Amino acid sequence: MQQIAQQLIYGIQLGSLYALIALGYTMVYGVLRLINFAHGDVYMVGAFVGFYACTRWLPFKDLAAHPEAAGANIALAVVALLLAMAICSAMGVLIERFAYRPLRNGLQKADAHFWGLVLGFPITGLFMPVFSGWGPLVAVAVGMGVGFAMRPLVAWLARRVKLSESRLNALITAIGVSLLLENGGLLVFGANPNFIPNILPEHTYTLPGGVMVGSSQLTILGVSVFLMLALRYIVMYTRPGKAMRAISHDIEAAKLMGIDTDRVIAFTFALGGALAGAGGAMVAALTHVKITPLFGLLPGLKAFVAAVLGGAGSLPGAMVGGLLMGSAESFVAGSSLSMFRDAIAFCVLIIILLVRPAGLMGRHVPEKV
Amino acid sequence: MTRSGGKLLGLLAALALAIGLNGCKQQGGSAADSDEIIIGEYASLTGTTATFGVSTHNGVLLAIDEANAAGGINGKKIKLITEDDRSKADEARVVVTKLVTQNKAVAVLGEVASTRSMTAAPVCQQYKVPMVSPSSTNPEVTRKGDYIFRVCFTDDFQAAVVGKFAYDKGYRKAAIFKDMKNDYSVAFADNFAKSFIKQGGKVVGEQSYQEGDTDFKSQLNTLKATGPDAILCPGYYSEVGTIARQAREIGLNVPILGGDGWDSPKLVPGAGTALNGCFFSNHRFSRELELPEIKAFIENYKKKYNETPDALAALGYDAAGLVVDAMKRASKLDGPGIRDAIAQTKGFKGVTGVITLDENRNARKEALILRIDGEVFRVEKTYRPEELGQ
């Protein structure tokens, strides 16, 4: 009994994280009918922001040497969390603006500028051996210059390929953005694993019955629940939230009613990015796992399954799906079948697709977003 | 618009051509140059086990530089070409193929991780180029063919040492937590269990994880319920630190045991204080041993890299030293010639012990048990192969 309760607590902690990420998937699916596969990588960026905030940007003190700094560190941790949320929501907006919006509205001048510059980086790589004597800055400048000169090529290609609003195009674009972020992460952050040192005081509480709960688990759970409540408030009671719901019902009708759909869609990506960023930063700082550019791959996939399990487009569904996924994984990992802990996610997905294709809450919930 | 696009395409094509030609010229030059002997090295310079590759590479480079400073091989200089496999097995096969077919390396050094050594070994075997692994301990590695060697002990021995040590230390019930996708970890766990049970101990629980997992509490909690005296966790440093932290967090405070996969300057930053007082087996290399060859190596290494070497650096140094030694004795400086010379190695005085390769192309060497004490690893015990009847 104690074992089961204990595994359930781990499951809830894991599940609350999956739920945070799954909310981003499900909101975007709600408004755009798009599976934003780059979402797991936004979570990764959140972890890296957490890492840099905890080790470089903010004046955290090592707890082992300065035990009195606990209070100051907690205040700084809140700043780090907000920072991760801000940067990740900006990333979400950026991804939407330059990767998905051109598919909806056609390629505009600004898009060609942007992708020309991005194209400059692989070109920089090509130039590296040629300009190695001149230093990397020159190579970067040359690469970006050539990339910038290629804007007409981008525009021309886009015209030839005829960007269309097909769902398949959007899906492939999402996978492309995900690969771009992962490999760009390898380039920028390097592939070496990073760890965040102990910056927050840690306690373990023993509940009646011998079940143990750690302060880091309580923090993750508490922050997740708070963010989900805040999200619910935003979606249900604010104007942008109402606009989101309107778009998820019927995007054309919403447009006719005078809703600036592009802005609301960007807002949706910002919300999702903030949640994923908070999740990534919390996991990185509180569970001391290694942080690498592929940090978001598996959690992203599992959160996606959680979103489908709960019913894509349904906010409560994503939360329930996340918790179910986390608990299932925790029980499997704790049993004698621990080698199947990742397989369970995909078994659940297959069963759900067979039995209830719309997900647990896919149909009944009216406030679809 | 179409016209300007066409022009741009032409420009791009010209650029690509220029860069391509440039590349060709460089490669042709190095392959045809016969004043140099080319040794290839593949290592995980980046990726999940980056510190393994970087340490080993530093050791290898030091040995090659010393050999060249001493006059090279019959007047010819040795050129080391190093490729990064990014800690990925598939990548290891690709870069070794490149080293052997394009760079025409006559010998290959690498890898630390057994899984990667095992994917690259068939390439070396196929092209008849000897491969010397500095520190892959899985027994299967050298069974891939008669061109594959190693300068370290195998997991049969290392894990048996840990099993015996655990029993001698008074532990009677051990639990195992292994990385099920890692050949090294799985073989280590099996051999440990055999040795520990033979001594009279009992394996009370077994759980597994995968590289890249972030949450180990569920498995650890199940292991905790079995009431072990110690936990064997034969994984790599990148996960072990997190596992130890989470074990302490759930109140699992028994010692954790491991193998040479723990040996990394990143182990303690990952674990914090969670691994204090834990033990792992390692190759015979420690500053505490007070041996003149180790002192000299540490001094030279510090001079070159301004940091203290770990055991993997010493093994890289020994692997490269052994290949250079064989090249000096080889009848012919090609793959088969060097292979025969390596196979005949007897009593090579390395930093990590005297190396004599047996008929299975493995080295018989001592193992250490190290105790983690803050940021330093202290020598707890030394085991010789004879002590375990091997």
Image (cartoon, rainbow, N blue to C red):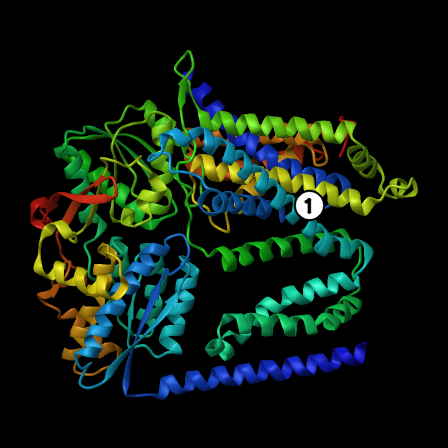
Residue B53 higher or lower than B10, as above or below? above
Quadrant showing the N terminus of chain A: top left
Q: Quick one: SS at disc 1?
A: loop
Residue at left offset 52%, top offset 85%: B21
- In-image side of A361 versus B207 (left or right): right
Looking at this view, is A146 or B183 the one in front? A146
Q: Position of residue B321 (x, y in %)?
A: 19, 69
Chain ID, mark 1: A
Check disc 1 and give the amino acid type.
Ile
Q: Position of residue A21 (x, y in %)?
A: 60, 38
Residue B348 higher or lower than A59, as above or below? below
Residue at left offset 44%, top offset 41%: B213
Quadrant showing the C terminus of chain A: top right
Q: Which corner quadrant of the image does residue B19 belong to? A: bottom right
Residue under label 1, please give it.
A35
Q: Is residue A267 visible?
A: yes
Residue B41 higher or lower than B12, as above or below? above
Q: Position of residue B52 (x, y in %)?
A: 32, 56
Q: Is residue B160 visible?
A: no
Q: Name, please, the residue furthest toward the right.
A: A256
Q: Position of residue A10 (x, y in %)?
A: 47, 27
The local crowd at label 1, few if under 14, some if 14 to 19, many if 20 or more residues have their Cα within 10 Å, is many
Q: Name, please, the residue furthest toward the top.
A: A208
Q: Which corner quadrant of the image does residue B147 belong to? A: bottom left
- In-image side of B260 versus B178 (left or right): left
Q: Which corner quadrant of the image does residue B186 belong to? A: top left
